[in-house]
Structures are given as C-alpha cells and as structure tokens.
Image (cartoon, rainbow, N blue to C red):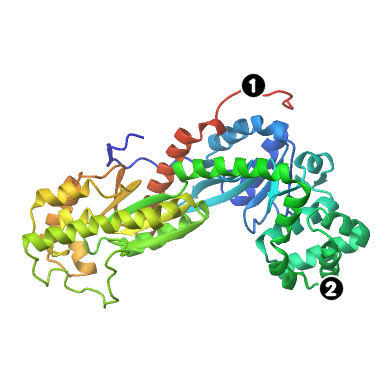
Amino acid sequence: MNPSIDEEKSGARPAISPDASSTSEFLRTLFLLLDEYGVRYCVLHSWESLPFELLSDLDLAVHPEDRVKLPAVFRRLQESGYLLIQCLNYSVNAYYFVFCWFEDLSLRSVPLDFIFEHWRSGLSVLSVQDIIDHRERYGEMWIPSRPHQFAYLLAKKTWKGKASPEQVQQLKHLVEILGRAESEAIAGEIFLDRWNQEIVAACLKGSLSKRLERVRSLPWMTAVIRHPLQLIRHAWQQGRRLIKRWLYPTGILVAVLGPDGSGKDTVIAGMSHALRRGFRSVAFYHWRPNVLFPRKPAPPVTDPHAKPPRGKFISSLYLAGFVLDYWIAYALRIRHRLTRSTLVIFDRYFYDIIVDPKRARFGGPVWLAELLARLVPRPDLTLVLDADERVMYARKGELSVAELRRQRQAYRELSVGIGSRKTVQTDQTIEKSIADATEAVVKFLQERFERRDEEWLRQSPLPNVRK
C-alpha cells in the first residue's frame, strides 16, 4: 500500500461465498483442507464443542515438516472469502493467525494458534512430532492422546498460573484415567523433586487452582538444572523474535477524525468491539496521550469554541509541548502496546488543530501547526468520518451548520502528516457506518499481511500431498 495515497473511493466489501457463513463452516473447511494437503496436525484442547462452537482461539500442533504445506491451505481459505489479517509470532515456532470475513454487516473472526514447537516457561515439555505420532481421530479432526492431553494442559495452566473450574475437572479426570504413576511421570518433566507428586495429588483433589500461582515459576528451575543448553538456545531464539516484534509491531495505531456530530464515539465503540479478536488488547486515547501535562478530569465540553485563543507565543509553546507529549507517550507506552499487538485508537489527533484551531485555543500561525503536524508519530491508518452538516448539527448542535460545512471541507483537504487514509460516511445506519470503518481496518491489515508476511501465502512445491 502506498501510504501517501488518499483512499477516498469506497471499494466493495470482499465477496464471501454462501458456504462461508459461520464459524462452524470455516472450521470444517479448515479441517478438510489440512487433511487434503496432508498436514499432520491435532487440536490441542476444547475439541468437544467443535466445529459447532469455538470457545476461544483454536490451538493446533502441526508437524514441523508440514509447515511448508500451510501456505497452500491459507491461499485456499482466502479464495473461499476468509481473509488472513494477522500473524503474531508470540513464541519460538508458535504463530497466532487471525482469519475474518463479513456476514452481512457483521465481522466474524477466528484466531488460529499453530504450534511447531511447544515451549512453556523455558521448557520444551512436549515434542510436537511425538504428539502427532500418537494422535487420535475425533469426528472431523485429530486430537492428542490422553497422556499428551494431560501434559499440554498442565504445562499451559502452570505457565499461566491459573485454571478454570472446568480445566481443573478435566485434569482430575485425566489423572483418574492415566493413573497416579503415569501422571506423576508426566508431571515430573515439568517439576523437580516431589513437586510432581504434590501437583498430581492436587489434581485428584480438585484443588489445583490454589497451587498454580505458587508453582508457576518452578518449571524455569527445571529448565536451568536439567536443560541449560536448551534453555540458552531458546533464550537466543526468543531474543531474535522479540527484536523482530519491536521492529515490525503487529498492533496498529488508528486515528479517528471528524467534526462534532460525525459519530466518532459510536464508530470507535463498534469498530473496536468488532476487531477485538484480531488483537491482544485495545487502548483508547482522546486527542493527545496526556503523559506530559496530564489534564484534570472535567465535564464534557458543550461549547468547544467558548474560550478565546491564546497568544501567538503561548500557543506556540503549547503546541511544542503537545508534540513532546505525543513522542514521550509513543516511546514509553504506545510503541510497547503496538509491539504487544494492541489496537491503539485515538479519538481526534494532533491534525485536528489544523482543521479546528479554536478548539485547542491555538492562536499561532497556521504554518507552525502544519510543520509540527509532520513531526508527531504518524498513525498507521487515519479514518475521517463525514456526514451532511445538517445531520451532524441535529446530533449535537454545538457548532453552527456553516462551521460544520467549513470543517468538512477542511478535513477533505487535510493531507499534512497523514499516511494511509479512508473517509467513512456516517449519515447512514449505525451498523453500516461501523461496518465501513471496520472494513477499512481489515483492508489495511490484510494488505500489511500480504506485504510483511507473504511467506505464509507463497506458492511452493508440496511434497506428498494427498490427492
């Protein structure tokens, strides 16, 4: 995507095939394609409700040799209307993908967690090859054997330091089936000394959740004592991964602009809800980050032009301080959040000073505002909300129709500092406005994926593909 191009023309929403109408159809298509292309995999947990209901993200162990076959599967899914928008390399040889599609005006998404190596707390407790060698067929999918189910769930819950009541019951059930001796042998791969016996006993009593917070750091001791060279190699790989995540963050910074009454609050709330599964978290800011010179809580502004502009010199100082506020916040908070796959949304941005200087009480020269606008961190995507000025006046009535008309024109002409941009009409139904804004973000993410993570879509020879 050329970041200097203003994407004003509203493109048609990607066509979705009639069969791609629900999560269950997506999962069925996924399992069929994995088998068709000979990808050796198994679903690691929560398969009982599949493919009819996906309770969280879908964890799949995939044989490392079959990684080369996944791009063909992903391309077929995209051809069926399922758009691949995210790739989060959250651990060594573990990737979190997000597919999405529109059903009418609603965005549906499915996160897929592909694991080629299983690392928890510095330990490679499970060999993915071993999991695959002992997998079992369960309906339309493959699942692990019971010993591997116990090992995976125990390692994951120990790493998180907590377990739900359902997971505690599942671990208890698995220990009862496997027997105490085999369960302790498996737990002994994670815990030193007699801790494996205590953990298995807690599983049988149904009291594991009380223990997990205390023992979550113990696997690191196991890794240091038993597998120091493996731990060093893992730490090196983790360091390389973290550097890449810092250089190429998987979060995005979206600035939402528009006159009063254009529907920013409504669109931001709906859009962030629709996109929540594509990110680890969502963070909101209003106009500026407020790290430097934080504003005190105040009632909502009902007359944004009531106070007079400051003098030229004071206005210039304020504006320079605002730029500094943006950069300090970006360095200390925002960049970190982007690296951790956060959707960062600004309701208004520094650019609003150029369109509506009276709101910021800016009385300095326009050229200074335009110059400083080039210096603030550039959003990945800027959404400009627009509506007929009479509609916006009817919604809020804080500014005159003439002023709203002037601001609409100013936003159309605004180009200083803005990169990728999309105008969203909001004088339509709320659902359509939210869908159009969401689609703009989805399109940006899809294009970024195809540019940055094209290896996952690249065509290559597929050995031993099942016909």
Viewer can see residue 130? yes
Q: Is residue 165 left or right of residue 10?
A: right
Residue 197 marker: none
Q: Is residue 134 left or right of residue 302?
A: right
* Residue placed most toward the observer, 380 or 333: 333
Of all residues, the one furthest to the bottom in this rendering is 299
Which residue corresponds to mark 1? Answer: 461
- Residue 283 location, x and y as percent? 42, 60
Among numbered discs 2 and 1, the one appearing first in the sequence:
2
In this view, 164 is above or below 320: below
In this view, 242 is above or below 323: above
Which residue corresponds to mark 2? Answer: 205
Quarter of the picture holding the C terminus? top right
* Residue placed most toward the observer, 195 or 96: 195
Of all residues, the one furthest to the top in this rendering is 461
Is the C-beta separation of discs 2 and 1 under 8 Å?
Answer: no
- Residue 466 location, x and y as percent? 74, 27
- Residue 455 location, x and y as percent? 54, 31
Task: Name the kind of residue labelled 2 in the image.
Answer: Lys
